[in-house]
Image: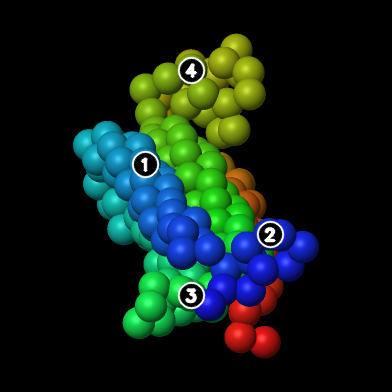
Amino acid sequence: MTEVVAGYDTCPVYAPAFGYIGAAGCMILANFGSAWGTWKAGCGVCKMGIIHPAGIIKNIVPIVMAGVLGIYGLIVAVIITQSISTPAYDGTTTYSLYTSYAHLAAGLCCGCSCLAAGGTIGVIGDVGVQCFGLKASGGKRAWITGEGANPADAGADAGDMNVANTQEASNKLYVGLLIMLIFAEALALYGLIVALILSQSTYSCSE
């Protein structure tokens, strides 16, 4: 029999539904963010590969970081699912509403964080790797000389690229790209940490 406190059923038969919604929502949103990031960044890497084929492996980082988001969702979803107790033979359960709400919040926290991080990684990766490819290959644009802040700085021999300057400039851009991707990935990590804390907030009617 479920426990009733002040006329309120703390462990109703429908309580596990909220827990499973949290687990499913976490997995779906995290995978959506991972797929979104992989899609956007993958398109950027393919476009960049036409301009600068040598940089394909180096710029695969956004795709890897986007793929990790699905693992975050998997971890939280498994923890939530394993915490949901099975009902007794008479249909009653020891899984409380308090625990189900905590698990629902944990799933949404991790899932939405991974979704936001995936979109950010995808957009940054798409634009960033293409810009890196143009910069590393010397691009056929106004910023062909050095850092290229001012196109008017290009001299008559601007077509003769200084390879050392080009590589240095592209490496600076790559470092900035990595920093942006790391902080974008951190958004999902924050959600994972809070979700793990929320998933430990439990109350059982058998206590």
| In the rendered image, the vertical position of residue 90 relative to residue 9, given as above or below | below
Camera-side residue of 16 and 59 = 16
State yes or no: discs 1 and 4 in contact (Cβ < 8 Å): no
Front position among marks 3 and 1? 3
Question: Is residue 108 something that shows in the picture?
Answer: yes
Residue 141 location in percent, x, y?
42, 20
Left or right of residue 81, residue 174 in this image:
right
Q: Mark 2 = which residue?
A: 8
Q: In the current view of this chain or complex, which residue is farthest to the bottom? A: 207
Going by the numbered disc 3, the residue's amino acid type is: Thr
Q: In the current view of this chain or complex, which residue is farthest to the top? A: 152
Front position among marks 3 and 2? 2
Helix, strand or loop status at disc 4? helix
Q: Residue at x 60, y 12 (%)?
A: 152
Q: Point out the tag, 1 or 4, that comes first from the N-terminus.
A: 1
State yes or no: discs 4 and 2 in contact (Cβ < 8 Å): no
